[in-house]
Image (cartoon, coloured by chain):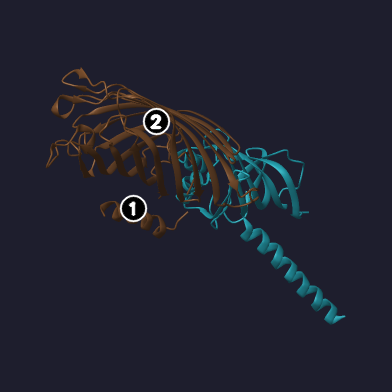
Chain colours: A cyan, B brown
């Protein structure tokens, strides 16, 4: 009986560790920027140089066939749409859309449901949101859009996975 | 010997620089502009062979034009081009029963050109762009050279001695598989050395290129590609003038059909083309162009 309790306790610690680790360090796991007008390798070089100027970006990769730029953000970095737009514009292209995969917890912002990203604490106001308990740990795949100046970005949910419910 | 040395330099430069680039026409202008602060260096060697002299002078002309162009993106829409030519000109002829060789080599006239993109329509993996061009050719090359036979004819001089404004426009439709470029440029040649004025020059080009390798593009990442290029390069030149009098043996119309090939990577292009005159309608008794061979590279920073 005692050894069974120890096993359960250890398993619980391991489970908690992985859940915690998954949420805390994942943050914005992936950013995907759809770029129109990208139709030759030379253009890619110019785009890469501009995007490398954004300090928060790491592991930048371009898919020419899909016209996409994929990257991750450095730990605790905030997603800055204006910076990405500026880099793409300076490279001579147009943004089709920005998608992210982010982990965090459900919260409220200005009376709206929102995602508070783990680590950075960046807030995204959620749309296409089905009621989930505040404080629930989630992983959301969606497209980001700007709101009026000074307000948090919006995140249109495409996929939502509850990692840990708060209740 | 000089020719061989320069050819060797160009080939060495091509071989030694092993980075990655892209795709545009070989003998035409394009509607695309580089990114802001992007630097592009292009080197192209052009060999022009002219013979088939309608006179009894049996003139035979061989020219090398080694062009180095530096392109800088001032903004994402505006770019500056500086083109420096190194010229080797050689004319062989028979006069008074004896053979004669004349020629010169050195830096020619430098051209400064600005390009501004005025129309852009982007789609996923496609773009449609139109740019306008404007600039000036500066009288940098020697324009009063002499040899043992006297002053070299004006077209054997390295420079014209004139400031010549250039205007033009270039359109590009580009996809991952194909590219179409159409451009026009007009050079207003003004009076230079010795009261000589070259006739104004209109150039018009249509270029099509098709990726032939890889046949299927990879889903992710980048790739190198091989393109086949086919261009129609036309030019019309008005008659030259000396002291205001037109030279009947100058000017005319030529249209080249120019097949070419390009190897394109992310930062580097190797390309080659041959320009074959399909229509040559020259005024008076001029030596006709047999062919022009162009080979070059581009690298971006």
Q: Residue at x 47, y 41 (%)?
A: A91
Q: Is residue B127 left or right of residue B49?
A: right
> Residue B163's image quarter?
top left
Q: Is residue A92 visible?
A: yes
Q: Are dots 2 and 1 on a single chain?
A: yes
Secondary structure category for the residue under label 1 = helix
Q: Quadrant of the N terminus of chain B?
A: bottom left
Outermost residue toward the front in this view: B97
For label 2, the residue is B116
Relative to B142, does residue B1 appear above or below in the rendering? below
Chain of the residue where label 2 is placed in the rendered structure: B
**Residue B28: image location, x then y, percent:** 43, 35
Chain of the residue where label 1 is placed in the rendered structure: B
Q: Residue at x 55, y 40 (%)?
A: A38
Question: In terms of sequence position, does the residue under pointer 2 or pointer 1 come before the other?
Answer: 1
Relative to B244, does residue B230 appear above or below in the rendering? below
For label 1, the residue is B7
**Residue B77: image location, x then y, percent:** 42, 34
**Residue B122: image location, x then y, percent:** 55, 33
Q: Nearer the viewer, residue B219 or B17?
A: B17
The CA span between labels 2 and 1 is 33 Å
Q: Residue at x 18, y 18 (%)?
A: B244
> Residue B115's image quarter?
top left
Label 2 or label 1, whichever lies nearer to me, is: 1
Task: Point out which mark residue B247 bears.
Answer: none
Relative to B246, does residue B5 appear above or below in the rendering? below
Q: Is residue B158 left or right of residue A2?
A: left
Q: Nearer the viewer, residue B222 or B55?
A: B55
Q: Is residue A79 visible?
A: no
């Amino acid at each position: 009986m005692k050894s069974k309790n120890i096993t359960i306790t250890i398993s619980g610690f391991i489970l908690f560790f992985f859940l915690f680790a998954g949420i805390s360090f994942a943050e914005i796991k992936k950013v995907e920027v759809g770029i129109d007008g990208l139709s030759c390798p030379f253009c890619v070089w110019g785009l890469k140089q501009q995007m490398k100027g954004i300090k928060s970006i790491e592991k930048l990769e371009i898919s020419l066939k899909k016209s996409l730029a994929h990257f991750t953000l450095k730990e605790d970095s905030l997603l800055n749409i204006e910076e990405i737009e500026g880099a793409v514009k300076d490279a001579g292209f147009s943004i089709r859309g920005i998608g992210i995969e982010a982990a965090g917890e459900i919260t409220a912002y200005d009376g709206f449901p929102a995602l508070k990203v783990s680590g950075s604490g960046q807030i995204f106001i959620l749309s296409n949101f089905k009621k989930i308990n505040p404080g629930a740990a989630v992983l959301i795949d969606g497209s980001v859009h700007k709101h009026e100046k000074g307000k948090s970005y919006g995140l249109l949910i495409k996929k939502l996975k509850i990692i840990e419910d708060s209740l | 010997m000089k020719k061989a040395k320069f050819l060797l330099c160009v080939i060495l430069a091509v071989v030694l620089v092993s980075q990655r680039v892209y795709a545009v026409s070989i003998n035409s202008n394009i509607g695309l502009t580089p990114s802001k602060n992007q630097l592009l260096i292009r080197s192209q060697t052009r060999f022009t062979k002219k013979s088939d002299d309608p006179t009894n002078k049996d003139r035979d002309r061989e020219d090398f034009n080694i062009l180095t162009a530096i392109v800088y993106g001032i903004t994402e829409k505006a770019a500056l081009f500086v083109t420096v030519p190194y010229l080797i000109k050689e004319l062989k002829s028979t006069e008074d029963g004896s053979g004669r060789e004349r020629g010169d080599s050195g830096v020619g006239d430098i051209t400064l050109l600005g390009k501004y993109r005025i129309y852009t329509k982007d789609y996923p993996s496609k773009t449609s762009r139109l740019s306008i061009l404007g600039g000036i050719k500066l009288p940098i090359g020697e324009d009063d050279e002499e040899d043992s036979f006297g002053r070299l004819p004006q077209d054997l001089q390295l420079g014209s001695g004139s400031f010549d404004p250039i205007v033009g426009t270039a359109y590009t439709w580009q996809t991952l598989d194909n590219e179409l470029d159409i451009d026009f440029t007009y050079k207003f040649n003004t009076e230079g050395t010795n009261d000589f004025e070259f006739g104004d020059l209109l150039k018009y080009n249509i270029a099509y290129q098709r990726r032939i390798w890889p046949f299927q593009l990879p889903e992710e990442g980048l790739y190198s590609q091989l393109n086949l290029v086919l261009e129609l390069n036309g030019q019309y030149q008005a008659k030259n003038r000396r002291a205001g009098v037109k030279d009947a043996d100058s000017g005319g119309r030529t249209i080249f059909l120019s097949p070419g090939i390009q190897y394109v990577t992310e930062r580097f292009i190797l390309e080659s083309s041959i320009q074959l005159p399909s229509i040559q309608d020259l005024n008076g008794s001029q030596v006709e162009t047999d062919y022009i061979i162009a080979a070059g590279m581009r690298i971006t920073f």
